[in-house]
Image (cartoon, rainbow, N blue to C red):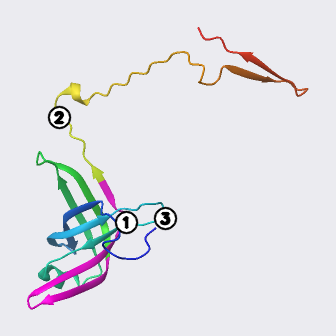
Amino acid sequence: MIKSDSITELKEAFFVQATLDISGKQIEGVPCKIYLPESTMDKPYFWFRPSKTQFDILSKIRESSFTAYIDGFNCKKEVIIFSPKVYLSKKSTRYWGPNFSESTIKGEPQNLKVIQIIDSTDNKESNRAFLNIWISPNNVLEPDLIPQYSYRGDIKYDRVKLS
């Protein structure tokens, strides 16, 4: 369970360069840490680390859509992260000196989708899945006895013959 809104308390699931869409205007390359729920009662959330110019735009809005892609070592998309609506809150800037600041914005995604892309090649053999199941008699597996119930309350067990 998340006890506080600290951005350093939990381990992020993804760190991406996100694209936020605000009424058709896109803000690209916004650094974002994505925290996925650890239990069924938790919610996913984002921590954005925008630049000063990105923060100037994002600080004036309340919601946007979110898209991010993660490329693999082969430069092909491996993960797509999408949320049609993200509510932006807890907007803050910490100034460390002249012309040097750090901004953070918390995002609460609605209908978040994380899609893992499995590489499919044109080779038909690689698209097939093979499953071999070996079935053999095993005295640990049930049922070796089958109960038969009588209307008088008697229970008779018949042993199953494995051949």
**Front-most of residues 36 and 21:** 36
| 75 lies above or below 126 | below
Q: Amino acid at mark 2?
A: Thr
Q: Residues within 10 Å of mark 1 (few under 14, many from 20)?
A: some
Residue at image point 28% right, 27% down:
128
Residue matched to label 3: 41
Q: CA distance from mark 2 to mark 3?
A: 39 Å
Q: Is residue 100 magenta?
A: yes
Image x and y of residue 126, in percent: 22, 28
Q: Which numbered tag is attached to residue 55?
A: none
Q: Is residue 133 visible?
A: yes
Q: Would you say the magenta stretch is mainly helix, strand or loop?
A: strand
Report the mark closest to the observer, 2 or 3: 3
Q: Amino acid at mark 3?
A: Met
Which stretch is magenta? Answer: 88-114
Residue assigned mark 2: 121
